[in-house]
Image (spheres, rainbow, N blue to C red):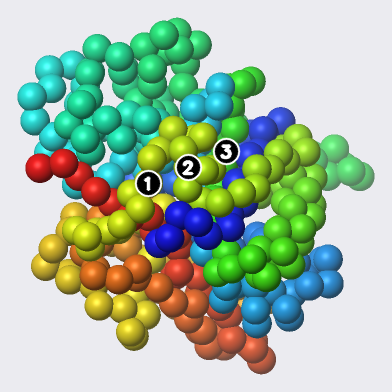
């Protein structure tokens, strides 16, 4: 992926708990996976009157990541599967790391990692700088109960327990959008900003009706992909001679993708979910975030269509998650 492509970095600072997949077994390695984020953005585009253009043009010319945590301007990303076997460490157990700062991942890939500078926050699974570990990780698991009360009788229904996460005061979430070119960036940057302003107010994830998933007014950074990544702590390679790609979103291969499945280091999972006004979506297998795919060219992924009983229109499934060139020192 050329690093001169135009890109948009979105930063959210939650003001309420979020109900999302963070920390659940079998869930994607993200706070909100790219297919769910795509669904939330599409719904916002519908409310703003841009859904037909978004589905026909914007979604096809934009690669998006999942939502990942950040804290004190430290950007965390899914830990690359290729680094799980990094040897010689005594203090840090890499098999337990869920997210790591981009700078830490870079030093591991370059075989320059100093484990005395890092500590693992067990509650969130985030590898943190030692000098910032005292205040806890970007978020912590949260469980709350809620019971509906009948307005006429005053009788409360049985309490319902729900799981979520609660963010630290100086923490939040980030996502990255990369456009095919300057023309698509000019059109969709402004519309994505409007969509996220709506999502910050309406909420992302579950229990939105109870006020969960809300954020302060989003912050944005625009520019070339390489510059945005460098400012976030990651120096992306200008070339990808090794033919490896680090997935920052869920990936489902397109027909023309030539991924060498006997190489790389990846994990997969099946995703279903529900469609508004109908039943359960059919399951679709994705490559998880944090995987390393072996492909001579940038894997495109696909946006597939699923037919669901009761719906007159197909449901789109987003499997074109963002992937960055990956280079690891031998």
Question: What is the x, y in percent for residue 259?
Answer: 23, 72
Question: What is the x, y in percent for residue 203?
Answer: 72, 47
Between 189 and 197, the residue placed more toward the observer is 189
In the picture, the quarter occupied by the N terminus is: bottom left
Q: Residues within 10 Å of mark 2 (few under 14, many from 20)?
A: some
Residue beneath disc 3: 173
Does residue 32 appear in this view?
no
Residue beneath disc 2: 229
Question: What is the x, y in percent for residue 51?
Answer: 74, 74
Which mark is drawn over residue 236? 1
50 lies above or below 155: below
Does residue 215 appear in this view?
yes
71 lies above or below 152: above
- The residue under the point 58% across, 80% down is 315
Question: Dot 3 lies on which element?
Answer: strand
Q: Earlier in the sequence, mark 2 or mark 1?
A: 2
């Amino acid at each position: 992926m050329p690093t001169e492509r135009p890109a948009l970095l979105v930063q959210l600072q939650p003001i309420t708990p979020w109900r999302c997949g963070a920390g659940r077994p079998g869930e994607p390695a993200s706070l909100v996976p790219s297919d769910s984020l795509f669904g939330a953005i599409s719904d916002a585009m519908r409310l703003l009157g841009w859904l037909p253009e978004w589905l026909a043009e914007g979604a096809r010319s934009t690669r998006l990541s999942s939502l990942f945590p950040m804290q004190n301007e430290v950007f965390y990303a899914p830990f690359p599967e290729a680094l799980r076997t990094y040897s010689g460490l005594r203090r840090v157990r890499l098999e337990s790391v869920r997210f790591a700062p981009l700078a830490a991942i870079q030093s591991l890939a370059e075989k320059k990692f100093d484990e005395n500078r890092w500590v693992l926050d067990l509650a969130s699974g985030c590898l943190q700088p030692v000098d910032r570990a005292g205040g806890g990780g970007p978020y912590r698991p949260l469980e709350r109960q809620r019971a509906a009360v009948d307005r006429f009788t005053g009788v409360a229904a049985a309490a319902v327990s729900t799981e979520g996460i609660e963010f630290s005061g100086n923490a939040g979430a980030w996502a990255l959008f990369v456009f095919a070119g300057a023309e698509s960036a000019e059109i969709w940057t402004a519309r994505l900003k409007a969509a996220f302003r709506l999502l910050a107010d309406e909420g992302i994830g579950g229990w939105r009706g109870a006020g969960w998933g809300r954020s302060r007014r989003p912050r944005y950074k625009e520019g070339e992909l390489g510059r945005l990544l460098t400012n976030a702590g990651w120096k992306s390679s200008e070339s990808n001679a090794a033919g490896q790609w680090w997935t920052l979103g869920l990936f489902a291969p397109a027909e023309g993708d030539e991924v060498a499945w006997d190489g790389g280091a990846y994990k997969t999972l099946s995703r279903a979910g529900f469609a508004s006004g109908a039943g359960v979506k059919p399951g679709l297998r994705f490559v998880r975030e944090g995987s390393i795919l072996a492909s001579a060219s940038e894997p495109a992924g696909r946006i597939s269509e699923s037919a669901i009983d009761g719906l007159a229109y197909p449901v789109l499934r987003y499997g074109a998650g963002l992937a960055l060139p990956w280079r690891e020192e031998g």
